Amino acid sequence: MSDDRGMSRRHALGVTAGTLATAALHDILAGPATALAATGPGQTPGLGYFTRFGVTEKLIQDALDTALGSGGDHADVFFQHQVQNVYGLEDGQVNRAYADVQLGVGVRVVTGDQTGYGFTEELTPEGLKLAAQTAAAIATGPARPGPQSFRVITDLPSRYAVQTPWEDVRPEGKLPILAGLNEKVFAADPRVKKARIFFVDQSSAILMATSDGRIVEDLQPMTLCYVTCVAEQGGQREEAGSSVAGRDGIAYYTPERLDRLVKKAVDRTVVLFDAVQAPAGEMPVVLAAGSSGILLHEAIGHGMEADFNRKGVSIYSDKIGKPVARPFVSIVDEGTQEHARGAINVDDEGHAVGKTMLVEGGTLTTYLHDSISAKHYGVKPTGNGRRESYQHPPMPRMRSTYMLPGPHGKDEIVQSVKKGIYCTNFTNGEVQIGAGDFTFYVKNGYMIEDGKITRPIKDVNIIGNGPKVLELVDMVSDDLAIDEGGWTCGKNGQRVPVSQGLPTVRVSSITVGGRKG
């Protein structure tokens, strides 16, 4: 797992810069690496954005015919064009700038629950044919005909429409945001000695076409800003940070959001000067609303992805219809929150996206499905087939995962704890998906003593088992918060943007370990 800056962890939550191509700083600051038009139809009826790259229904049809040349149950093609710009500010200067441009297509062939996959950067008949032949190697049987015609899906929702697309915003429209954040960080507290700002804007277009004759396109913006500050007091130095991210344009960076970003980064840093070691042992743990959803996502959510259950890896493999938590615990995964980092209009298999109730009233009701697992279980896909890029096949992935509000109040939860800890900010951690065993590092937290939040703590690990912790959730507050940070989830070598959230939750007992010294 990694935090928002990409630190190494097993199943990661954090920002990814992808495979960035380094460019000359003056070139990046001069303007976008390449134009990515956000609107406007193409020249071929039924197709839109990708016609500018020579993509036609004939090209797609031929690729699908080749993909099914050795049989196979299903085939699809996935086109992607993505432009990403990254800026870094340190010591008051923009000292890093990167650009990443991706253009390519992936071809998938599915036979049973097996997948063949090929991809290419060449959007030509020859390039697609070679990629399709590579994918078709998974199948051994008589050729099947591809689609004779296509139906274009045009009634997609609009969950992340932007007024000004990123490709229309020149660097001089972005760099003042970084400079302003830098000034705000230093003005927030005299103990701040250093600030680092990391800024990303991204425009992506995708097109999927399937062997059952569907074509769907989507245009997906994204942005992220991360602020890290270093403070010093009496010879002691501390460092922490905060991020915001969403599928939005330049208008995302309102004064209120920027002020909130700075306040979180600085507050998380300077509180560490007064932090003490937490006592070790088994004790109640209260998870703060919002970013504590990392624990729900990693230690529990992955175990509810259908591929892990189809393969018998997850501890939830035989738990559908059975209680897995208290009756007041319900867990949702959805992709419908407007402008959220985990929002999608359509998944990467072209399926509609909605809200999936994973746990309802304490009972596990379903898994997160892509088309392969949905066919295996005899259900409809849940819109969770996601992939990192055209170079990767889709698999079941979370979008925005959170626990619904419960019957308790935050104050009631805190007052119920005689001795325990209150966790407000997590960074590193490790999770074993099958069993659900985890270790998480608590960057910021507090002691709870006699029902009151008291001393700040640091250098704390919590250790436990996700499914067991879910059973031990004995109080859930009514203050659900969806965190706005730049969370990225890693699985099987692929990384996708996600959102997460949690109300204030009490777990009756988790092992707490502090570092001595």
Image: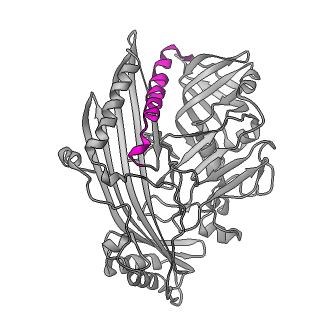
Which residue is outermost to the front?
A: 163
Which residue is outermost to the top?
A: 234
> Would residue 18 be found to the left or right of residue 359 on screen?
left
> Would residue 16 be found to the left or right of residue 507 on screen?
left
Q: Which residue shows up at 34% across the image and 36% down it?
A: 177
Q: Which residue shows up at 67% across the image and 70% down it?
A: 376
From the top left corner, tell me how far across and down residue 178 is, in percent: 33, 35
Q: Is residue 231 above or below residue 369?
A: above
Q: Nearer the viewer, residue 377 or 478?
A: 478
From the top left corner, tell me how far across and down residue 292 is, in percent: 60, 36
Q: Which residue shows up at 70% across the image and 53% down it?
A: 358
Asked if the stretch drawn in magenta spans residue 477, the answer is no
Residue 504 falls in image quadrant = top right
Q: Nearer the viewer, residue 269 or 410?
A: 410
Specify whether residue 6 is in view.
no
Residue 287 falls in image quadrant = top right
Magenta-drawn stretch, dominant element (helix, strand or loop)? helix
Q: Nearer the viewer, residue 83 or 11?
A: 83
The image's colour scheme reads one colour
Specify whether residue 109 is in view.
yes
Q: Is residue 205 above or below residue 24?
A: below
Instruction: Give the number of marks.
Output: 0
From the top left corner, tell me how far across and down residue 20 is, in percent: 31, 51
What is the span of residues highlighted in magenta in the rendered image? 249-276
Residue 309 falls in image quadrant = bottom right
From the top left corner, tell me how far across and down residue 61 is, in percent: 43, 83
Asked if the stretch drawn in magenta spans residue 256, the answer is yes
> Would residue 243 be found to the left or right of residue 290 on screen?
left
Q: Is residue 326 above or below residue 215?
A: above
